[in-house]
Amino acid sequence: MRSQASAAANSAVLLVEDDAALSGYLAASLRDNGFTVQTAQDRTQALACLAQPSAPVLVLLDLGLPPQPSTMREGLAVLDEGLRIAPNLKILVLTGQDDASAAREAVRRGAFDFLLKPVTLDAVLQALRRAQLFAREEARSEREGQARLHITTRIGEGPKEAGAAAEEQLLRRTFTAADYNVAETARQLGLAREHVYYYLNKYGIRRPQ
């Protein structure tokens, strides 16, 4: 199951950074400290990596990515789509000292933590180890039949929209943890397989290619 594999290998990190020098330095430093590292330079590369069944649970994400590195648009798109693909991701965003609003927006959308540039290696390692611990405990809870959902919704949207968001996230988490097996997803959720197919279609959830 995906959750068990993630728990066993949560030292894997996806580093999304378009600055080649910084990416090279961080990747080498993280490997020296026991992490396995995959790298991506833009949204397309990052999402291709996250769509793989063996994708890392930990993500270190620079919000300023090409083709618009001076804005946070591309980084937030990676954050949004990454959490849709795998809601159990622990995404730590890197942002500039002047971008307190960017950090707040990233956390609102589900980022696990944020780090302000310039950032020290020690700060990165501490943040990743906190995320590791959190991911490990979440995986343990899932094995015990519990799921922690992170739902962000505007109060004005009302309970119907919040309920739909929770429904979608629970389905995505369970489907991913069941290694995209519909029968196992149905068993875990206590639903008929036809109902699982209905909800998968409703929310546009597909098994990664």
Image (cartoon, rainbow, N blue to C red):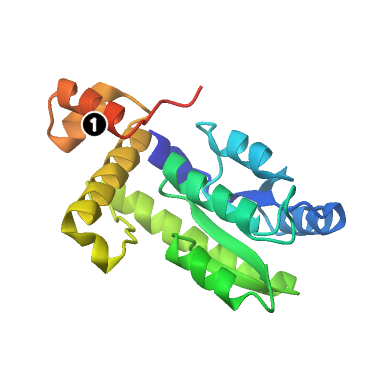
Reading the image, the residue beneath label 1 is 199
Q: Report if residue 121 is visible in the image.
A: yes
Which residue sits at x=17%, y=58%? 159
14, above or below 108, in the image:
above
Looking at this view, name the residue that lies furthest to the front: 156
Is 58 drawn above or below residue 111 in the view shown? above
Q: Position of residue 86 (x, y in %)?
A: 44, 43
| Count of numbered badges drawn on the protein | 1
Judged from the image, the secondary structure of the residue bearing numbered disc 1 is: helix
Most foreground residue, 104 or 189: 104
Q: Position of residue 155 (x, y in %)?
A: 25, 67
Residue type at mark 1: give it.
Tyr
Can residue 60 be seen here?
no
Residue pictured at 28% horizontal, 39% vertical: 171
Closer to us: 137 or 120: 120
- Find residue 93 and report its horizontal and vertical position in percent: 60, 63
